[in-house]
Amino acid sequence: MTQETVTAGVTPSQVVAQRLREIRTRRGLSAREVAELCRATGLHHMDRSVIANIETGRRRGVSVDELLALAYVLEVAPVHLLVPLEDTGVFYRFTPSWAAFPVAVRAWVRGEYALPGIDRRGFYAEIPESEVQELATTQAELDERHERRKAQVRDLLRHKGKRFRFATREEAD
């Protein structure tokens, strides 16, 4: 994870807009049809123009209710609307001041990985016992993957003359 106040990276609103359009198009649905499906879930304010405005970015952000309804009617997990599918080296700004690689944010959203800076004990304490798996292995694997990716991005940015400061797991613990 890196803390930065610049506009580098994509935001959740941008990703939801892009993924909504991609999935809707792939499913062969019009904006009107998605709106009708959303209204059938009880979100009566969703019409074709709301869907179009989300997709074009004229409407920034969706509510949690809308995100879940969109995921349901598009038949995808909410994480697939919320976070980029691929880690292309572009940061995902999950808050205005904090960004991380999409692979780390996807694992965090799924409850599999505590991002650097998050207290692991508190994070894992909220996982229901029935869902506890081999999280230590997952955490270690994701930490290693995150460190490898940081090194790749540092090399890339060095060539471009830019500097970023990454929080390390040691700083966070």
Image: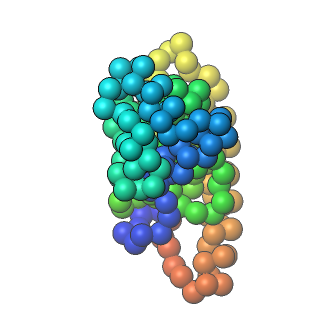
The residue located at (42%, 39%) in the rendering is 48
The residue located at (57%, 55%) in the rendering is 101
Q: Position of residue 92 (x, y in %)?
A: 50, 56
Q: Nearer the viewer, residue 134 or 83?
A: 83
The residue located at (64%, 26%) in the rendering is 134
Q: How many marks?
A: 0
Q: Nearer the viewer, residue 28 or 55?
A: 28
Q: Residue furthest top?
A: 130
Q: Nearer the viewer, residue 101 or 80?
A: 80
Q: Position of residue 153 (x, y in %)?
A: 63, 69
Q: Quadrant of residue 98?
A: bottom left
Q: Nearer the viewer, residue 8 or 30?
A: 30
The answer to whether residue 171 is seen in the rendering is no
The answer to whether residue 17 is seen in the rendering is yes
Identify the colour scheme used. rainbow
The residue located at (48%, 25%) in the rendering is 37
Q: Quadrant of residue 47?
A: top left
Q: Position of residue 88 (x, y in %)?
A: 66, 60
61 to 79, vertically: above or below: below
Q: Position of residue 90 (x, y in %)?
A: 58, 63
Q: Is residue 98 left or right of residue 18?
A: left
147 to 5, vertically: above or below: above
Q: Is residue 55 left or right of residue 96?
A: right
